[in-house]
Image (cartoon, helix red, strand yellow):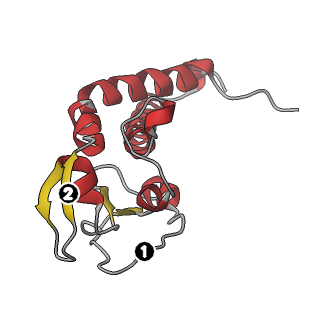
Amino acid sequence: MATENLSFAAQVSEWAKAEIEREEAIFHEAAQTVANEVRTPVAEGGRMPLKTGTLRRSLMASTSDMPRIQEGKTTFSESGIEMIMAGAELGSTIYLGFQAAYAARMNYGFVGTDSLGRTYNQTGFGFVDAVAQRWPQIVIGAEAKVRGRFEAGPAPQS
């Protein structure tokens, strides 16, 4: 349908809808990028240490509150964070948090004796902080990616 055949109100409505869809797409793309980057292992250019994958799998997403540490839990399965983020409404908050009890120690480091009597002198990997510091660049990248999808137009139908 050609826009010149639409009323002014219909044109504004389409434009407004497109803008909201674009903002929402950028929001979801940026959130997904954060989740992906924070879980990228050192061997793949990220900062997350990867031994068994437990820490990586313990990442949880929520739109209601920060996911909590699960004391004593040692195994985690993929939590479907992509579905939670995809369902988040524009303007809402997406909380990402690691549930593994040792997540903070791996991110920030730890020197001393823990509650189980183990002694550590461990430098942190900073996987959360590094991604958080990149937030402005992540949003710019998400906008560029979404802009490319929207400007490409709809995919041809077969």
Mark 2, Cα crowd under 10 Å, few <14 / some 14-19 / many 20+, is few
Mark 1, Cα crowd under 10 Å, few <14 / some 14-19 / many 20+, is few
Residue on which disc 1 sits: 74
Tell me residue 130's x, y (percent).
26, 35
Residue at image point 48% right, 73% down = 75
Given contact means CB atoms under 8 Å apart, are the residues at marks 1 and 2 in contact? no
Residue at image point 37% right, 55% down = 89
Asked if residue 80 lies left or right of residue 74, the reply is right
| Helix, strand or loop at mark 2 | strand
Q: Quadrant of the N terminus?
A: top right
**Number of marks in the rendered image:** 2
* Farthest-out residue, right: 158
Tell me residue 139's x, y (percent).
32, 30
Is 8 placed above or below 27 here? above
Residue at image point 54% right, 25% down = 150
Query: Which circle marks residue 145 in the picture?
Result: none
Dividing the picture into quarters, in which one does residue 37 lie? top left
Q: Give 17 or 5, whichever is nearer the viewer.
A: 17
Q: Quadrant of the C terminus?
A: top right
* Amino acid type indicated by mark 1: Thr
Q: Nearer the viewer, mark 1 or mark 2?
A: 2
Tell me residue 48's x, y (percent).
38, 43
Tell me residue 84's x, y (percent).
45, 61
Is 55 placed above or below 134 here? below
Query: Which circle marks residue 120 in the picture?
Result: 2
Is 40 placed above or below 81 here? above
Going from N to C along the chain, the mark reached first, 1 or 2, is 1
* Amino acid type indicated by mark 2: Tyr
